[in-house]
Amino acid sequence: MPLNNKLKEYRAKMNINQQEMGQLVNASRQTISLIERGDYSPSVTLAIKISNVFGVTVEDIFQYEEDLENADK
Amino acid sequence: MQTNNLILETENTGKIKENRKENKKASKSFIVIMIVSMLVGGIIGGLSTVVKEDFLKDERINQVIGKFFMTVIGTSSPFVMGLIGIVGFSISIHLYRKSREQYKNGNKEDEALYEVIEKKLSYAIAISSSILVIDFFFFEASTYYMVHGNGFAFIIPSVIIFLGSIFVLLIIQQKIVDFEKEMNPEKMGSIYDMKFQSKWMDSCDEAEQLITYKSAFAAFRMVNILCIFLMVSLSLLSLCFQIGLLPAFVVTLIWFTMQIVYVKESICLNNKKMKHTS
């Protein structure tokens, strides 16, 4: 099931590029790019680290498509 | 407790029925494939015997064919190695230089830039690695020709070109790896280090490791298919030509090693505590 994310939006708000984002969460620029494109779902650890960078919850950044559909209903 | 056991038993029975249904469905096409394969194999085997009895009856024909291929490949080895090296390495170097240029002049905030560069560098590595594999074959052909075909004249240029190829390959790969490390500072390892592969892998994060694992599995599956194809082909060829048992033995060794290492690693990983790198 695809995982939607708002990582790019949050990153833009903080004005940091993918390389810098990667350094903050100990991941590569490539991984950040894959996550933003929706081509890779991060591990729990990485998702928590990413959300901690922005001071938000994991659910604020990552959402299951199913959960979004249920919310719309 | 009794209720739970009953639920489990019901689920198991359901699963068993599902398995039987799935096996029955898949086995129909499997049986057809097996029958067709046996028929085709039987026909080709029969034809091979006819070819052997009618066209290759005279053992000298076998020798002539063998000598022909040995001579053609042996004499052309230095030229082929040289040509492949010049063309292949030129392309790799061009891709590397283009990438360098793009990185230097491009907007480093542009994420698409990195994707384009990574792709070019991947192609450069793939081409240069492929050249090495091909060169190994032709070098082996040269040494074989030297020993069995009196092709002493071709061995020296073959050695020079082979060693030259290795040297150029190392330089290209070193440049590419260093460039990757510039773009991705978390990457570790020098290509001259015997432990380069494990150091590089350790410095990759979860997504990069997953890409490597998936690629390795795709290669594993392809080699499995290739081994089956080779064994069948070698069996048929041995009916017509005196190829000996060594080719089949080598394929068996490779195939067996792959299976054992795969199973062994699976068992070890199942017993270990799995953890992500990040």
Image (cartoon, coloured by chain):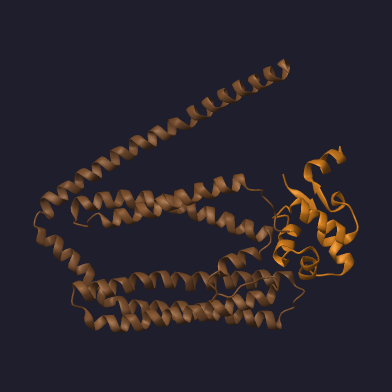
Chain colours: A orange, B brown
Residue depicted at x 73% and y 55%:
A38
Give the quadrant of the N terminus of chain B.
Answer: top right
Query: In terms of depth relative to the viewer, which is nearer, B46 or A28?
Result: A28
Q: Quadrant of residue B156?
A: bottom left
Q: Is residue B90 left or right of residue A16?
A: left
Residue B140 percent location from the top left of the image: 31, 71
- Residue lying furthest top: B2
Residue A14 percent location from the top left of the image: 89, 67
User: Vertical placement of B238 versus A26: above or below?
Assistant: above
Residue depicted at x 66% and y 64%:
B204
User: Vertical placement of B159 versus B4: above or below?
Assistant: below
Give the quadrant of the C terminus of chain B.
Answer: bottom right
Is residue A45 in view? yes
Query: In terms of depth relative to the viewer, which is nearer, B21 or B194?
Result: B194
Q: Quadrant of residue A56?
A: bottom right
Residue B43 percent location from the top left of the image: 24, 42
Query: In terms of depth relative to the viewer, which is nearer, B185 or B230?
Result: B185
User: Number of marks in the image?
Assistant: 0
Q: Is residue B202 left or right of residue B258?
A: right
Q: Is residue B187 left or right of residue B70?
A: right
- Residue lying furthest left: B58
Residue depicted at x 41% and y 83%:
B164
Is residue A6 in view? no
Residue B182 percent location from the top left of the image: 68, 77
